[in-house]
């Protein structure tokens, strides 16, 4: 079945460091790919998405490119801030729609 | 902005009680979902609904039921709460259709069963 694998955390970075969180997926057909962010004590917020191969999603300085050849959707940010500290979830939605399938989440902690 | 509202943020219930978690969305979405989030287990789908009075089991439906009498409201019911149902519950909604439609989440309901 469809699945998502993302790098385990926690990830600890200093402010202004470069961030990469790896995400790979297994799916039939052409799913859409998403990154969600969860701040402490809150629900999930959509960070960015891509709906077809080679699409790049971007928001708030974060970027991810839908790579079908490597079945990946890695999240990157050039310079993280303390306020980026949160849990990040990679997810896919199958081509036919329906539920989201989530990775396990990666906790990011950014130190001043 | 899309709004998914969960009526209770924090609840404490006793074992054996019947528990209702309510969720309302204001975007006329056809699809609504209930997920459960637990440390180390991630997010798991309990039930989803693709239309009024329609429902489908997710990955972990045991011990839960749902109700969708109106399009904007989706209720999760714990018929007889147990301690292993202590968790964070997340409601979500989206338009029907292809994979590109974003699923929007509520703020979550923290349930403790004692």
Image (cartoon, coloured by chain):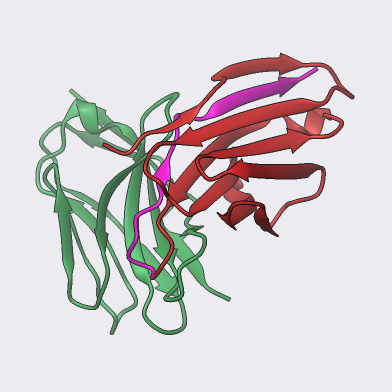
Of residue B22 and residue A102, the one placed in the foreground of this image is B22
B60 relative position to A112: left or right: right
Q: Position of residue B61 (x, y in %)?
A: 75, 51
Q: Position of residue B16 (x, y in %)?
A: 89, 24
Residue sitting at x 64%, y 42%:
B69
- Residue B38 visible, this angle: no
Quadrant placement of the C terminus of chain A: top left
Asked where in the image residue B112 lies, by quadrant, the reply is top right
| Residue positioned most to the right | B16
A6 relative position to A65: left or right: right
Residue sitting at x 76%, y 17%:
B13
- The answer to whether B87 is drawn above or below residue A100 in the figure is above
- The answer to whether B112 is drawn above or below residue B27 in the figure is above
Residue sitting at x 41%, y 68%:
B97
Residue sitting at x 71%, y 28%:
B20
Q: Position of residue B89 (x, y in %)?
A: 59, 35
- The answer to whether B33 is drawn above or below residue B76 in the figure is below
Q: Position of residue A70 (x, y in %)?
A: 30, 80
Q: Is residue A12 magenta?
A: no
Of residue B48 and residue B58, the one placed in the foreground of this image is B48
- Residue B111 visible, this angle: yes
Of residue A112 and residue A104, the one placed in the foreground of this image is A104
- The answer to whether A53 is drawn above or below residue A91 in the figure is below
Colour green maps to chain? A
Total count of labels: 0
Quadrant placement of the N terminus of chain A: bottom right
B101 relative position to B112: left or right: left
B83 relative position to A78: left or right: right
Colour red maps to chain? B
In the image, which residues are magenta? Answer: B98-114
């Amino acid at each position: 079945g469809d699945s998502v694998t993302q790098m385990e955390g926690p990830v600890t970075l200093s402010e202004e460091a470069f961030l990469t969180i790896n995400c790979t997926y297994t799916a039939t057909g052409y799913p859409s790919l998403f990154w969600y962010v969860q701040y402490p004590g809150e629900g999930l917020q959509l960070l960015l998405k891509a709906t077809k191969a080679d699409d790049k999603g971007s928001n708030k300085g974060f970027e991810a490119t839908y790579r079908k050849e490597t079945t990946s959707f890695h999240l990157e940010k050039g310079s993280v801030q303390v306020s980026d500290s949160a849990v990040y979830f990679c997810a896919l939605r199958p081509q036919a729609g329906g539920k989201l399938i989530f990775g396990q989440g990666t906790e990011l902690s950014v130190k001043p | 902005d899309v709004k998914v509202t969960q009526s209770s943020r924090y609840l404490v219930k006793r074992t054996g009680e019947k528990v209702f978690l309510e969720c309302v969305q204001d975007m006329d979405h056809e699809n609504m979902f209930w997920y459960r989030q637990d440390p180390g287990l991630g997010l798991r789908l309990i039930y989803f609904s693709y239309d009024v009075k329609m429902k489908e089991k997710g990955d972990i439906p045991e011990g839960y039921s749902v109700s969708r009498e109106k399009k904007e409201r989706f209720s999760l019911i714990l018929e007889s709460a147990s301690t292993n149902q202590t968790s964070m519950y997340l409601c979500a909604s989206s338009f029907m259709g292809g994979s590109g439609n974003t699923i929007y989440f509520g703020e979550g309901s923290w349930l403790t069963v004692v």
